[in-house]
Amino acid sequence: MADDHVRVTGVPTGLFIGGQWRAASGGATFAVRDPSTGEVLAEVADATPEDGTAALDAAAAAQESWAATPPRTRSDILRRAFDLALEHEDDLAALMTLEMGKPLAESRGEVTYGAEFLRWFSEEAVRIHGDYRTNPEGTGRGIVLRRPVGPVYAITPWNFPLAMATRKIGPALAAGCTVVLKPAELTPLTTLFLVELFRRAGLPDGVLNVVPALDAKGLSAPILADRRLRKLTFTGSTPVGSALLKQAADTVLKTSMELGGNAPLLVFDDADLDQAVEAAMQAKFRNVGEACTAANRFFVQEGIADAFTAALTAKVDAFRIGRGTEDGTTMGPLIDDRAVDKAAALVDDAVQRGARLVTGGERVDRPGTFYAPTVLDDVQPGSDILTTEIFGPVVSITRFATEEEGIRLANDTEYGLVAYAFTGDFRRGQRLAERLETGMLGLNTGVVSNAAFPFGGVKSSGLGREGSHEGIEEYLESVYVLTP
Ligand code: NAD
């Protein structure tokens, strides 16, 4: 082992295909690093395209029997996986913090949030119902069946390595679909451990397969071209989602896309200042700002702007930066150098175009990939930061005068995943719900994610929903039987 290798033992680092952990067929591995130190945590098997096909072989072979498995049995396995995830909360959280960087308390929060999709969908598994209908002419009677779509290919990002996987595995398994999962190459360890928990929960061989790989495109192309595959579910950036949709068109593959965001956060003069600041901190800084739901563009009404900016800046200056494993750390590193370069470039561009740097605005001088939490005020139209997903700890504030102007600014983006708004006026809240172009709205709250609600976006933020009963629909199809 090289000198920069550290611990992480007892966690699977192979491919999981047909119920077996194994090496990649080419024998290759790739390194997973700790972003707070740059040290190598583990070497993980690097799946070849042949391994990808073998995983799909296993999923296709298991599909019929999994679909025929009684819903209660599928439900019980999901529930056992939920219990095991909570029993191993500390292990999962530690892995997440090591490979992704966020403080341990936040990683524990992701375990609770992510595991909930397993419990939620264990409960949905036994409530998949068709119906009986008559036609308006009175001449036909029909039974509508709900059937699993078939084998699923799931691709997940690095920013929530547990929750993005459970949001897909939960509903797919509940519906009776088998799965091939490709975790992000930067954070495969948490996902591999989760898959091991499914094995321990008694999931039959072939129902869930996992193929980490450095060459995501090379691995994915043959899987996507294979007509045995019936569904693609992707969470990641909009450009990659768009490229995958083009590939999916060739086989008319059913797809769900959870893509990028550019969330507006509106603060109106009549907002409760303390509540707005507290919630804005969560909406912006959860996961070091590396969340699709992160507030990207703050629009603050003129009458409250000075007080809001001052109160927010005081909280931002109180962050304690460090390794996520250290006591007292409230902000960890960004995922890699590219992420730091991107945040720095966006801040520099905004300042050059006339924004006022209130705090931060620099890299942190220590090993690892850290960027100081930053507040920019008076960000000017035309700044890159208003059109780009920041994915870092940077607040961009623009002031506005009227509700009409606030709504116009909020909607001025190709994205539409989530919006946040703070107001004491209930009628204004209703108007915002009807007029903001978004899949989700946090009204006087900074966190919208919850397994019981349909998570997803409009415009370039995606297609389909995850969570709630809508989430399982993505893995089902309707078949009707008509009789006279
Ligand atoms: P990414 O698009 O670079 O990668 C996502 C996944 O796709 C990774 O597993 C990657 O290996 C794989 N991938 C990359 N190119 C591929 C290709 N050509 N073919 C097949 N697979 C490919 O995104 P990322 O940097 O990992 O994640 C950050 C992005 O994800 C942000 O844009 C964020 O907003 C988005 N995201 C969205 C949601 C949501 O629910 N809407 C949730 C989390 C993250």
Image: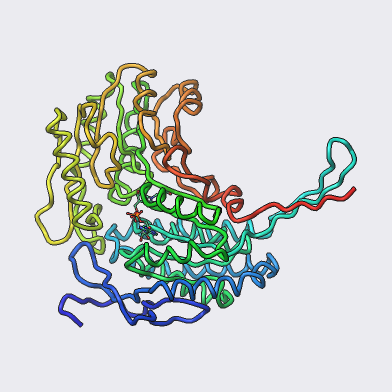
Left or right? Give the position of 24 relative to 101. right
Q: Please name the residue shown 41% across and 72% down the image.
A: 49
Image quadrant where residue 369 sits:
bottom left
Q: Residue furthest front?
A: 250
Q: Please name the residue shown 28% across and 40% down the image.
A: 388
Q: Is residue 48 above or below residue 263?
A: below
In percent of width and height, residue 275 lies at: 36, 34
Q: Is residue 390 above or below residue 213?
A: above
239 or 358, nearer to the observer: 239
Q: Is residue 79 above or below residue 440?
A: below
In percent of width and height, residue 273 lies at: 32, 29
Q: Please name the residue shown 20% across and 83% down the image.
A: 1
Q: Please name the residue shown 24% across and 68% down the image.
A: 33
Question: Which quadrant contains ligand 1?
Answer: bottom left
Q: Residue furthest left?
A: 365
Image quadrant where residue 43 sits:
bottom left
In percent of width and height, residue 83 lies at: 52, 67
Left or right? Give the position of 381 relative to 115. left
Left or right? Give the position of 61 relative to 424. right
In percent of width and height, residue 375 lies at: 20, 37
Coloration mode? rainbow
**Total number of numbered discs in the rendering:** 0
